[in-house]
Amino acid sequence: MTISEIVKDILSKAEIKNIFFVACGGSRAACWPAKFFLETEAKHMATTLFTSNEFVHATPVSCNDHSIVVACSLRGTPETVEALRVGRERGAYTVAFTGDPAFLGDPDYALARAGKYMVPYRNSDKLSCLEGNSVKLFQFAVELLHQAEGYSGYQDVQKGLTVLDDVIAAARQKAGPLAQKFVNAYERKDTIYVIGSGPSFGTAYAFSICSLMEISWIHSPTVHAGEYFHGPFETTGPDLPVLLLKNEGATRALDERADRFLAQYDGGHQVLDAQELCMDAIPEKVRGYFNGFVLGSVLSDYLNLLGKARRHDRSVRRYMWQVAY
Amino acid sequence: MTISEIVKDILSKAEIKNIFFVACGGSRAACWPAKFFLETEAKHMATTLFTSNEFVHATPVSCNDHSIVVACSLRGTPETVEALRVGRERGAYTVAFTGDPAFLGDPDYALARAGKYMVPYRNSDKLSCLEGNSVKLFQFAVELLHQAEGYSGYQDVQKGLTVLDDVIAAARQKAGPLAQKFVNAYERKDTIYVIGSGPSFGTAYAFSICSLMEISWIHSPTVHAGEYFHGPFETTGPDLPVLLLKNEGATRALDERADRFLAQYDGGHQVLDAQELCMDAIPEKVRGYFNGFVLGSVLSDYLNLLGKARRHDRSVRRYMWQVAY
């Protein structure tokens, strides 16, 4: 079934009142654009994003046969499989976004078997981003809103998706020197802050916990640009390593405020600005929802360059997939 | 009006479909127990917690005359005042939790004037915790759920509140040596991770961004115990400074898993375990919702001891209240 058919099938059976996204780590971050979109645009449906094991152990009373539980995991993370099973037990409609077994995914289909519906995905810098988890989750969210409530930006989103690969290719080209500048400045640092907001807060979180902490073994507080001024900014000083993601769209004002402060009191902070990343081809009305895809793709190049500079291969792990945990 | 009367008044006028908590930094963290409670227990009401300025710039479509916007700020943080104004403009019922002007609060009543209803509070280690923002916000959430949907744990929560000050006093006494151990181990560290989950994730966040980053100028990634294994654990090694908060209740399994891993691969991590903090007097059915109040009060002593050891007065700031931002 296509994403559109899955949504249609669910809505033919129930009035949906809430959507729970359940996933871990990078997969959880991949849910962010979908979650942010629904949280902002839905009139009648509530949206929550859980790390899977919290959903398992503190399942909301409101998860029932008017709910959709959307789970995402490349290779069937056990607690994500369990979260989907719990959702199904509660009577919710369960959708498994999981790695295509033909492409580095889960050969056991563990997550797919736990869910009623399945959407396979393939994440790779070398494939269209439309094949990846984050865009597919977003498409699901947009389809759901459009079919359930009607969404006036629906056609604009489709236009945006059509040009997204080209936008990303141009953005990566344009940001190449910025990535090199970031790496030159920070390759020897042991702590790097990442600041984001709104649609790209999930991207900031993913860069912190996956690219920096997991893959590069660099400490990384993730700071919301709106929260920065209510605590975290007190550690700022000349040349504190900070990567600031600036959104195109609604919450840009928050990012700009952080940028102004950092320009005055840090001076060495690095800025990745979505407004400089060739996003004009995406219709303005919905452009903000695409921040995460564009910034995230560019940051993948940051990570690759950082790994080369630190001579730290991005596949090396101390614990993940190496020991029992 | 009492909290109960405010809830009654709102429910006499509208069927409430969603609650938005809007606040910044420590005040945002103070909303966590209320937010976690409603998110877990409410059948028909959706709950979201925003940092105020994101609510201002990316206001959800679903905020309308079936909504409550609950704002919290000691002294009328401008973006929190603005968030409440935006909520009111959308037709939402607005409730301002703000510092009692007679007690270190906002003499201008800026937040109170922006809201339809007002709940004054007084935060101090020397007063009953029932006077503070976090418990009052939680009481509001419990009243709302009970009056709107009926809540079977309502009487148990009241019993818990009755004994809470005694529990906290006993917990602080008992945790004194742990606080000293934490300070002895970490007073010279420049990075301390804080791990929490479920009801106490807000407490972990507050300790990171307020106690460590803002007040002590120590870098501090906040890590969810469920997310720890999906990225952040890769920086763990012998003697990485980590403070792990262990909950009493639903998500304890997540905290225990992190504890086991840290015991094996860190060894120097510090544990603050709510199960050791005299919470037995709180009825078991609702005990989990009290984790944040008990852990948070104990951590205030951690902060005081840390400040003394580092000769860093907890009132000193570089930027907050010192410069324009």
Image: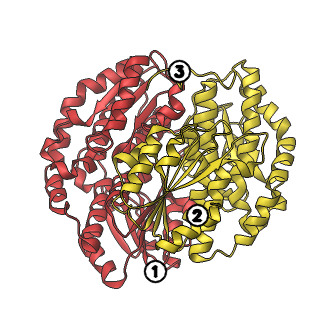
Chain colours: A red, B yellow
Q: Which chain carries label 2?
A: B
User: Between residues A235 and A126, which one lies in front from this camera angle?
Assistant: A235
Q: What's the amino acid at mark 2?
A: Ile
In this rendering, the label closer to the viewer, 1 or 3: 3
Residue B309 placement, left or right of A124: right
Q: Could you tell me which secondary element the residue under label 3 belongs to?
A: loop
Q: What's the amino acid at mark 1?
A: Asp
Which residue lies at the image location 50% right of the left edge and 28% below the top edge? A233
Q: Is residue B48 above or below residue A209?
A: below
Which residue lies at the image location 60% right of the left edge and 57% below the top edge? B34
The quarter in which the N terminus of chain A is drawn is bottom left
Q: On the image, which quarter does residue B266 sit in?
A: top right
What residue would you read off at disc 1? A65
Tags 2 and 1 touching, CB below 8 Å: no
User: Between residues A7 and A147, which one lies in front from this camera angle?
Assistant: A147
Tags 3 and 2 touching, CB below 8 Å: no
Q: Do labels 3 and 2 share a chain?
A: yes
User: Between residues B86 and A92, which one lies in front from this camera angle?
Assistant: B86
Residue B224 placement, left or right of A239: right
In this rendering, the label closer to the viewer, 3 or 2: 2
Q: On the image, which quarter does residue B271 sit in?
A: top right
What residue would you read off at disc 2? B6
Check residue B322 in the rendering and tell me which mark sits there, or answer none: 3
